[in-house]
Amino acid sequence: MNTLNDLHKISSTFSNTAKMPVLFLGHGSPMNAIEENQFVAGFRNLAKTLPQPNAILCISAHWFTKGTKVTAMEMPRTIHDFGGFPRELFAVQYPAQGSPELAIATKELLLPTEVELDHEWGLDHGAWSVIKHLYPEANVPVIQMSIDYSKSPQYHFELAQKLSALRHKGILIVGSGNIVHNLRLVDFYNMDVDNYGFDWAIEARKKVNKFLLEGNFQALIDYEKQGQALQLAIPTPEHYLPLIYTLGLKDKNEELSLFNDKLLGGSLSMTSVKIM
């Protein structure tokens, strides 16, 4: 990838900055948007370590589409894409501006991949429920990029690499999902038990964390080959692929660290990743 050429493409839109971190946030339940718990505290503590971004590009598990899209409206709506939660949660609005300029820059960086500029979606709870703890005043523009469900993890890893130039333009890139995410097996009776996971979830978390900290990203791309524990942890790929985008943006000399690294309800993990 020719980073200098890519920087030139977007030089008129965003000024040069020091390289921004990249994040993967385990977003968990939408209730994390309004509850006070250790994971929300972890997001707020993370925010203290981040430079102020010019804008945020979020890849959320909850925008899974045929083809790749980016939101390009001036004011994205707050999407309440869930059901069965208290009215208080549906009342939450996150009125961050969009950034049509960033959407266009993203589209150009990803060429020859076709990217659709979207004016319908907005910010789903994979984005706003966690970003609101980083920037509670909604004073940073946010766009979302969808995940093409027809493509392989390797494809998504390589597509993410094309976004690297944005890191030098003050853009904070955030993947939002959950590494261990099997909703069918959640033990709702033990949701309040700290760091509680089934044996297979404990094994999957340990294996993924080892690969992350060793920098063995190919094993994570090839997660379907890593045994039954990971198959149970990742029964469908949409919550896992945002991690692959985050890893695709890591440079060799950067440090990867984990936070909020706990299991929840037997079959979920809140493990989050910071790269800088």
Image (cartoon, rainbow, N blue to C red):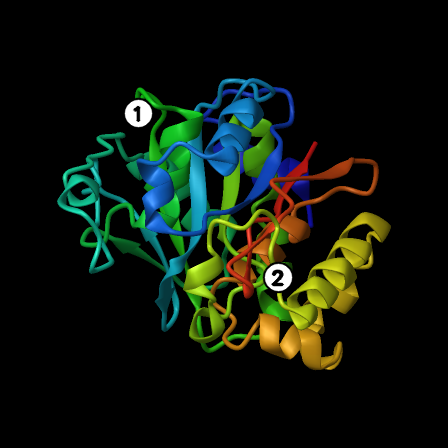
Q: Nearer the viewer, mark 2 or mark 1?
A: 2
N-terminal of the two: label 2 or label 1? 1
Residue 105 position in % (x across, y down): 43, 41
Picture quarter with the C terminus? top right
Question: Which residue shows up at 51% across the image and 37% down it?
Answer: 39
What element does badge 2 sit on?
loop
Q: In the rendered structure, are the residues bearing label 2 and label 1 in contact, judged by CB atoms less than 8 Å apart?
A: no
| Dot label at residue 78 | none
Where residue 253 sits: x, y (%)? Answer: 83, 36
Give the residue at x 58% y 40%. Answer: 23
225 sits to left or right of 146: right
Crowding near the residue tagged with mark 2, few <14, some 14–19, many ≥20 C-alpha atoms within 10 Å:
many
Q: Is residue 146 above or below residue 95?
A: below
Q: Which residue is mark 1?
A: 138
Q: CA–CA distance between discs 2 and 1?
A: 34 Å
* Residue 240 coordinates in the image, percent (x, y): 55, 63
Crowdedness near tag 1: few (<14), some (14–19) or many (≥20) residues, C-alpha within 10 Å: some
Q: Is residue 45 above or below residue 240?
A: above
Q: Is residue 244 left or right of residue 186?
A: right
Residue type at mark 2 is Gly
Q: Amino acid at mark 1?
A: Ala
Residue 115's image quarter? bottom left
The residue identified by callout 2 is 197
Residue 143 visible to the viewer: no
Please name whichever residue, 130 or 147, is drawn nearer the observer in this view of the structure. 130
Q: Position of residue 34 (x, y in %)?
A: 31, 35
Total marks placed? 2
In the visual, does 276 lie left or right of 61? Answer: right
**Element class at badge 1:** loop
Residue in the picture at 24% in, 58% down: 82
Query: Which residue is rendered at x = 33% and y = 45% of the image?
Result: 31
